[in-house]
Amino acid sequence: MADKQPNRGFFSSLIPRHGNGGGRSAAAATLEWAEEQRRAMVETQLRRRGIRDERVLAAMGRMPRHEFVPPQLFPEAYEDHPLPIGGGQTISQPYIVAAMIEALALQGAESVLEVGTGSGYEAAVLAALAARVYTIEYDAELARTARERLSRMGLANIVVIEGDGSLGYPAAAPYEGILVAAAAPEIPPRLFEQLTEGGRLVIPVGRRDWQELRLIRKLDAKPVVTRLGQCRFVPLLGEHGWEET
Ligand code: SAM
């Protein structure tokens, strides 16, 4: 599972060139293109690779991922790799977003914390699957842009916070689910504390360049760990993260 931006030497999908398309507006053509891209993404990148939660598949099949990437990368929005979003950060590959969210096993009534808002895409998918989403971002500019984008899209059950998510967000704790979208050297203790009993934390843990994706469940106040596979994320910064280079 790769989250870091690979070398992108290909350009395999193109948005239709907008004429009036025989009466169709450019906006309608784009919507149709995006819908087709999402259908293909769900089938080939998610379902075929083992994502089974129909709610996750449906939410990602509806979410307009192209609205979360810089305009020049619009044609690549649904491709099978992460993309740069500015500030040296990335929007994660669709598969890893689906795998992490599926591991939270959301039913719809939960309060969820995401660490690493980035573009806001993953928070938007979470907001379609849970009651409330708090998402915290270290980079002030990314936090501002994501807050504006999510509010423009009318997603009212998401709160974007600027701050150090390695400390969690105690003001709204506890959470049934916590998703960390950046690589941690260890499981940040404050995040585990902010889980409900029975709550789930999904987090990449390991070296700065390679990590293991882990699901930690809080059972009888103790961590029960499931290893979900290797992955590669940008580093978690802050008090319980890596030092900035
Ligand atoms: N979930 C995002 C999306 O859907 O676009 C992608 C997240 S990106 C892979 C990782 C993000 O974690 C970056 O935006 C980075 O600035 C942020 N980050 C790193 N350390 C952080 C910290 N201590 N607290 C909050 N955010 C942090």
Image (cartoon, rainbow, N blue to C red):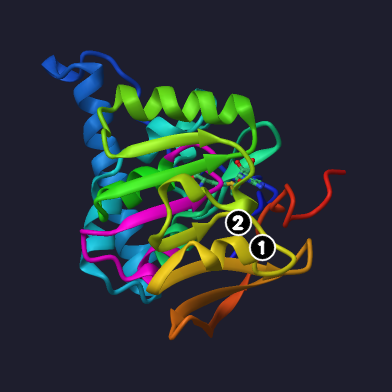
**Residue 39 versus residue 47 in the image, above or below:** above
Image quadrant assignment for residue 36 = top left
Q: Toward the viewer: 174 or 151?
A: 174
Tell whether position 104 is magenta.
yes
State the residue at coordinates (78%, 62%): 209
Q: Which mark is residue 232?
A: 1
- Classify mark 2: residues with Cα within 10 Å, few (<14), some (14-19) or many (20+): many
- Classify mark 1: residues with Cα within 10 Å, few (<14), some (14-19) or many (20+): many
Residue, disc 2: 3
State the residue at coordinates (29%, 27%): 153
Helix, strand or loop for disc 1: loop
Helix, strand or loop for disc 2: loop
In the displayed structure image, the side of residue 217 where residue 241 appears, left or right: right
Q: Toward the viewer: 195 or 237?
A: 195
Image quadrant assignment for residue 240 = bottom right
Tell whether position 56 is magenta.
no
State the residue at coordinates (87%, 43%): 245
State the residue at coordinates (24%, 42%): 35
Look at the image and tell me in which quarter the N terminus lies.
bottom right
Q: The residue under label 2 is which amino acid type?
A: Asp
**Residue 105, position in %: x, y?**
32, 71
**Residue 238, position in %: x, y?**
73, 47
CB at disc 2 and ligand 1 closer than 8 Å: yes
The answer to whether mark 1 and mark 2 are in CB contact below 8 A is: yes
Residue at mark 1 to residue at mark 2: CA–CA distance = 5 Å
Closer to the N terminus: mark 1 or mark 2?
2
Range of magenta residues: 100-120
Q: Which mark is residue 7?
A: none
**Residue 103 versus residue 24 in the image, above or below:** below
Q: The residue under label 1 is which amino acid type?
A: Arg
Q: Toward the viewer: 108 or 6?
A: 108
Query: How many numbered marks have been drawn onto this rendered protein structure?
Result: 2
